Image: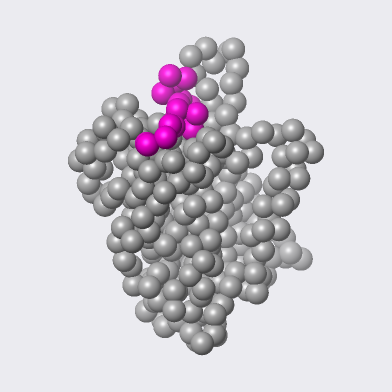
């Protein structure tokens, strides 16, 4: 049986991690492992700013081909907002950058229109952005898009991995599928006719946004830290939400099964699957064990489950 992997499809996660570590060491940037960067200033008094930037990777290719500007916009917000909320911050404003081969057709305009509508749901302003025509760089009829978000959080409401202690519980929330990671490998499976049209369509579902749930739990003072399960899979993202003296005991059998991930495990080595895809876990919070039931009750619509503990 053929077993596919990310590296042979064109993405080298280990190499990317090495580059990040080298940049962090060379320029003494200590927060590159955080989901969002913190900016503190005496001008802000009791508040701190947080910021991050992201795109939707090669998922944009089939979304352009199938003319799905609403999903492009949703996923761009999701990839940035789900990172931002791990700090507890609420969004203030958003900027976008688009690199296009040409400006023919309506999909870029429709993407921006949808972007504004989605951001309005989170009281986040779309301040503007930049569109560059780069016919020498971007393939004909395609474009790439990146987002930049800035949020604010009261200092006594910031989530912090330093609050985490031994015995704390990990509560996970299900994903809506693949989200926006691992698409170079997904597209390889599809182009090689290993994946059906129906399953490929399932992969294109919009990324779930967890902001409303996170703010509710944080306002109730039920959680200590949070992790967006994005590129790199479950463990490598969740480990970013705890201190270096701790590790994780996770029950992978507790994850509700989804057809797409069961299929992927038949074509890709299991270890590779869990290092590339979210495997059904979209977001996690870490809490004191006494708060578990209250969290499960207050986040029921996000399909929460107890995933493990800090050791």
| Range of residues picked out in magenta | 149-168
* Residue 126 on image: x %, y %: 50, 39
Residue drawn 24% across the image and 42% down it: 296
Residue drawn 26% across the image and 32% down it: 290
Q: Left or right: where does residue 101 sit relative to residue 207?
A: right
Q: Left or right: where does residue 103 sit relative to residue 59?
A: right
Q: Nearer the viewer, residue 164 or 70?
A: 164
Specify whether residue 84 is in view. Answer: no
- Quick check: is 29 in the magenta stretch? no
Q: Nearer the viewer, residue 115 or 188?
A: 188
Q: Nearer the viewer, residue 259 or 141?
A: 259
Indicate how the structure is coloured in the image.
one colour
* Residue 120 on image: x %, y %: 39, 40
Q: Looking at the picture, does residue 137 appear above or below residue 290?
A: below
Q: Left or right: where does residue 274 sit relative to residue 214?
A: right
* Figure quadrant of residue 60: bottom right
Residue drawn 33% across the image and 67% down it: 258
- Tell me the quarter of the image containing the C terminus: top left
Residue drawn 33% across the image and 45% down it: 171
Specify whether residue 259 is in view. Answer: yes
* Residue 282 on image: x %, y %: 40, 53
* Residue 22 on image: x %, y %: 76, 45
Q: Left or right: where does residue 45 sit relative to residue 131?
A: left
* Figure quadrant of residue 27: top right
């Amino acid at each position: 049986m053929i077993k596919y992997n990310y590296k042979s499809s064109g993405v080298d996660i280990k190499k990317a991690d090495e580059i990040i570590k080298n940049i962090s060491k060379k320029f003494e940037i200590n927060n590159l492992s955080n989901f969002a960067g913190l900016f503190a200033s005496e001008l802000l008094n009791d508040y701190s700013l947080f910021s991050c930037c992201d795109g939707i990777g090669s998922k944009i290719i089939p979304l352009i081909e199938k003319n799905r500007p609403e999903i492009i916009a949703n996923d761009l917000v999701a990839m940035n907002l789900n990172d931002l909320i791990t700090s507890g911050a609420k969004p203030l404003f958003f900027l976008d950058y688009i690199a296009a081969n040409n400006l023919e057709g309506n999909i870029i305009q429709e993407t921006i229109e949808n972007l504004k509508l989605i951001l309005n749901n989170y009281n986040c302003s779309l301040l503007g952005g930049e569109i560059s025509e780069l016919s020498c760089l971007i393939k004909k009829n395609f474009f790439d898009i990146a987002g930049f978000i800035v949020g604010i959080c009261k200092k006594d409401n910031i989530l912090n991995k330093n609050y985490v202690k031994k015995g704390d519980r990990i509560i996970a929330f299900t994903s809506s599928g693949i989200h926006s990671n691992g698409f170079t490998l997904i597209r390889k499976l599809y182009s090689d006719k290993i994946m059906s049209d129906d399953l490929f369509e399932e992969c294109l579902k919009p990324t779930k946004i967890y902001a409303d749930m996170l703010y509710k739990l944080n306002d109730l003072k039920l959680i200590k830290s949070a992790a967006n399960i994005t590129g790199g899979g479950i463990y490598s993202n969740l480990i970013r939400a705890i201190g270096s003296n701790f590790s994780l005991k996770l029950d992978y059998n507790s994850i509700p099964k989804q057809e797409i991930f069961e299929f992927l495990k038949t074509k890709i080595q299991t270890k590779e699957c869990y290092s590339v895809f979210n495997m059904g876990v979209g977001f996690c919070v870490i809490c004191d064990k006494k708060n578990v039931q209250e969290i499960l009750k207050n986040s029921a619509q996000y399909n929460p489950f107890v995933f493990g503990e800090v050791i």
